[in-house]
């Protein structure tokens, strides 16, 4: 974890303060938490990865920002441990019951018991069936960061969902739902001030991971991701101040949404080119061409999941044949190829 890349607490819009907390994931560096002035107290959005360093940073941030007032409400955008991890600590510290969506709550409670996204062995078998090299499999097993290493969750929550409105410090925030990166991520949008708390759905410079996971091998999460972005785009615009969970706040939600969609179209086109070289290719064969940088063990998860997500999209478009042999090994062959101007949602199954 890199403390030096974190910022001191700062006010990013009237009454909205940012706390940065280091995370153990190399490419993310830190997570942004938000403290929203809310009458006699503050509403907090997201929690950080739960460890001693986070708790110390939280205490220091609260001391600086809260001015002696309490945290009276906690909203969790999604179940990933850098967002939900320290929720048990914060809930207990301030005597609050967190607000989050039902699917994120359930996902977190499964992951913390080493189920769902944290069934390490199930994932290893899935990667092996996709032809991942022994070397990458060993790296994955060695470096994968376990959810329960940084998460302590409260026992109960208050449900929010698509269209829920929350009054916080004189602003009305509407919950918008992001999908594809996590099952039911809560974003918060204030139309009156044109501010979007974007969680991990819309990040600057980096693209949110959109993966297929072993418990739903035929999933088409790119459709979930892009269609939820399209719904979000109906609310936000070119001047929207975006408060992302990672990296810096920026202006221009609409432009960034267009860039994210374009990124995935390019990834699909790259895969079409790679698949045109030979039939019956496996994800393991494609890894080097798809991911130029050396991956750490934790990134292997996202790399395979993301490759399968794009292959499943091409399969749904009728361009790729998926073949599973008698031992469960999976390969892909290009059967027709069109360069799509957009991810063609209407042909999704
Ligand atoms: Zn996330």
Image (tube, rainbow, N blue to C red):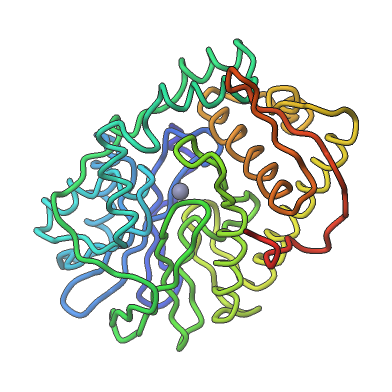
- At a point 76% along the width and 46% down the height, the residue shown is 267
- At a point 61% along the width and 32% down the height, the residue shown is 304
Occupied quadrant, residue 98: bottom left
Seen from the viewer's position, the closer of residues 284 and 324 is 324
Q: Where is residue 338 in the image (x, y as percent from the top left)?
A: 88, 54
Q: How many labels does the image show?
A: 0
Q: Is residue 129 shown above or below 202?
A: above
Q: Is residue 240 shown above or below 243?
A: below
Seen from the viewer's position, the closer of residues 245 and 297 is 297
Occupied quadrant, residue 54: top left
Q: Where is residue 290 in the image (x, y as percent from the top left)?
A: 75, 33
Q: Which residue appears farthest toward the front when viewing the image?
A: 326
Q: Is residue 12 shown above or below 102?
A: below
Q: Where is residue 137 in the image (x, y as percent from the top left)?
A: 55, 16
Q: In this view, does 236 lie to the left or right of 65?
A: right
- At a point 57% along the width and 27% down the height, the residue shown is 300
Seen from the viewer's position, the closer of residues 141 and 151 is 141
Which quarter shows the C terminus? bottom right
- At a point 18% along the width and 59% down the height, the residue shown is 157
Which quarter shows the N terminus? top left
Q: Where is residue 203 in the image (x, y as percent from the top left)?
A: 57, 56
């Amino acid at each position: 974890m890199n403390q030096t890349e974190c910022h001191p607490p700062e006010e990013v819009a009237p009454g909205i303060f940012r706390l940065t907390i280091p995370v153990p994931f190399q490419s993310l560096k830190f997570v942004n938490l938000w403290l929203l002035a809310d009458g006699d107290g503050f509403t907090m959005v997201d929690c950080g990865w739960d460890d001693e360093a986070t708790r110390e940073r939280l205490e220091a941030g609260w001391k600086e920002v809260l001015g002696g007032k309490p945290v009276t409400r906690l909203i969790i955008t999604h179940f990933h441990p850098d967002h939900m991890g320290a929720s048990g600590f914060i809930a207990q510290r301030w005597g609050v019951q967190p607000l989050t969506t039902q699917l994120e709550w359930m996902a977190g409670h499964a992951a913390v018991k080493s189920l769902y996204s944290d069934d390490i062995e199930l994932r290893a078998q899935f990667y092996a069936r996709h032809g991942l090299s022994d070397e990458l499999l060993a790296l994955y097993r060695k470096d994968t960061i376990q959810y329960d290493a940084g998460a302590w969750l409260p026992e109960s929550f208050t449900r929010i969902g698509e269209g829920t409105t929350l009054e916080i410090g004189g602003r009305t925030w509407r919950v918008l739902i992001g999908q594809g990166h996590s099952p039911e991520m809560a974003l918060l949008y204030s139309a009156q001030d044109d501010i979007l708390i974007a969680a991990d759905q819309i990040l600057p410079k980096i693209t949110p991971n959109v993966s297929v996971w072993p418990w739903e091998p035929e999933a088409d999460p790119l459709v979930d991701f892009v269609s939820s972005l399209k719904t979000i785009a109906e609310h936000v615009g070119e001047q929207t101040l975006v408060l992302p969970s990672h990296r810096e706040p920026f202006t221009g939600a609409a432009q960034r949404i267009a860039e994210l969609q374009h990124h995935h179209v390019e990834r699909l086109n790259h895969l079409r080119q790679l698949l045109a070289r030979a039939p019956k290719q496996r994800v393991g064969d494609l890894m080097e061409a798809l991911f130029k940088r050396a991956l750490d063990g934790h990134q292997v998860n996202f790399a395979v999941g993301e490759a399968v997500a794009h292959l499943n999209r091409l399969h749904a478009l009728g361009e790729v044949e998926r073949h599973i042999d008698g031992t469960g090994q999976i390969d892909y062959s290009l059967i027709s190829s069109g360069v799509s101007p957009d991810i063609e949602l209407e042909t999704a199954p």
